[in-house]
Structures are given as C-alpha cells and as structure tokens.
Amino acid sequence: MDEKVIINFTPTGMIPTKEMTPHVPISVDEVIEDVHKAWEIGITMAHIHARDPETGEPTYKADIYAKMIEGIRKFAPDLVICVSLSGRNFGEFKKRSEPCDLKGNLKPDMGSLTLSSVNFNKQASVNEPQMIQDLAHKMKELGIVPELEAFDSGMINYARYLAKKRLLEPPFYFNLLLGNVACAQPDLLHAGIMIKDLPENSFWSLAGIGLSQINMNSVAIAMGGGVRIGIEDNIYYDKKKKKLATNEELVKRIHVLAEANDRALMTSKEFREKMNLQPGNGQYGRS
C-alpha cells in the first residue's frame, strides 16, 4: 500500500473498434495523441497495444510499437511504457515476444504477462505454462519488467511459483482485473482476497472490466492502491451506457477521485525508483 496513486493508462486494448466507439485510438498517431493528453493530466505509466494500420486489428509487430514509443518519448522521455504481449490473438512465442526485442530509446520498460489462460465472453486468451515461463525468462534476460496480470487469486499463486523459480524478481507490479465473466468478480471480497495474497514487495492496481471500472477504481483509491484506467477496459463513461467515454475524461475523473481521497499521483520517476527501473531519458527497463 502506498500513499500515492499509480495511474496505469490503457488507451486501446484489443477489443474496442471505431464501430463501437469513435474515441478509441487505433492508429499510431491517435495512440500518441491520447497518451500525450493523459500525460498532461497526470499518469504514472502507459500500457499500449499496437493495431495494424490497414485493418485496425491487433498486431504484435515491433515496428509499430517502435513508432508509438518513439512518439511518446519525444514529449515524455521518462514515462514508464509497457507493451502488450497478449495471447488473445497470437499463439507463437516469437510473435508474442517480438516487442521485447526493441532496444535503446525504443526499449519498453515493461511487458504484460498474463499469469494463466482466460476465457472472455467470446474468446480465450491462451497462456500455457511454458509460454508464460518463456516470456518471463526473455523479459528477465532483456531487463524488461513483467506487468503481472491476474484475473483471479490462482494467478497470484502462479506468480509466487514463478518467483520461486527465479523467473520473477521483486519488486513486483500487479494489475488485478476484476469483472470478467469467467474470473474474479468486482466486489470487495474478491478484491480483498487477491490483494491479501500478493507476495511481499508488491505494488498493485485494480481494474474493473466494463461497467465495473469506476467501482474498482474507486475501491483502489480508497484502499491505498493504484488504478488501471482507459478505453481498453470500458468504452462508457456512465453505467446507463448513454455516454461514450474519451480517455481524457476517464483520466480526469480518476484525478477527481484521488483528490477527494487526499492522494497524490505517483510520478513516473517515483515509480521507476520503487520498481528498480532505470531513470528514463534514454535509459529504460532494469539494468
């Protein structure tokens, strides 16, 4: 638990399309622009997904991630950047791990690591044990910190297992995602159990899937944790689904909640120090 709020900004994801909401950033320039707006308001880190420029479909291509990272670091050279290594659309290790191969000023600080397979409403994200371990091993070798994604308490136990195998090293950062139909639900009991099960030296953010986003963000701020916020998890601003959200509006609302709870933003610099990340400005990931 920390007195400052980690704001993990997730602008795009793999599901929202322009048909669902015109506000989701799809192109490289759109993602850069939304991250810029969020950064000006105040965020700790950005969790980015790449899309194919022609089809708008999710892609693993490192060259597209490189363009986004380059654009973001022009205005925010110390912002912590996490790239998606999701298995929802890609099953091969070479594809999933490709963004980790970026180097120098394009190197990501973190990469997402979902700690088990997950069934969503219409699709599965397959994460076999060997795939998870291979991704963790590659990130460790390259000095990229895993952003640990847990959809239920069993995934946290698997993180402990990976730590015993020395594939994960503290300090840890967890995204606890609640509200998916086949996983932990967005209530105080599920959130409390998952937080209690975290290993020592862990930082965490709560995410609510869909309309539970604001509930889980509110709980996290009240409990002293961080938040994951953005159109990736929820396209609506209100629970009655009358207003489509912009990323800018979602981030601004988090700041209102944080201010009401007398909690300041954890800056990228502070988060880097706590996570043993290099200082940015040309030095990224863990040494």
Image: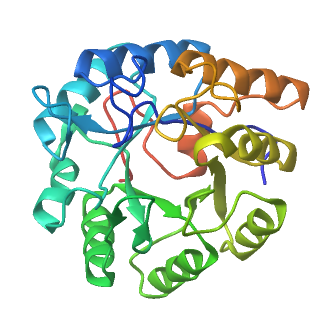
Q: Along the line of sight, which residue is nearer the eye, 17 or 1?
A: 17
Asked which quadrant contains residue 196, the reply is: bottom right
Give the answer, above or below, for where 16 lies relative to 59. above
Give the answer, above or below, for where 67 lies relative to 112. above
> In the image, what residue occupies the spot 42% across and 65% down?
114
Query: How far across and down, in percent of the image, does residue 117 sit?
Result: 39, 73
Query: How far across and down, in percent of the image, does residue 127 sit?
Result: 33, 73
> In the image, what residue occupies the spot 23% across and 56% down?
89
> In the image, what residue occupies the spot 30% across and 62% down?
139
> In the image, what residue occupies the spot 77% across and 73% down?
193
Image position of 64 (left or right of 5) = left
Image coloring type? rainbow
Asked which quadrant contains residue 122, the reply is: bottom left
Query: How far across and down, in percent of the image, does residue 283 sit?
Result: 33, 37
Q: Along the line of sight, which residue is nearer the eye, 26 or 82?
A: 26
Image position of 91 (left or right of 156) = left
Give the answer, above or below, for where 137 lies relative to 154. above
Quadrant (top left, top right, bottom left, bottom right) of the N terminus: bottom right
Query: How far across and down, in percent of the image, does residue 189 sit?
Result: 82, 68
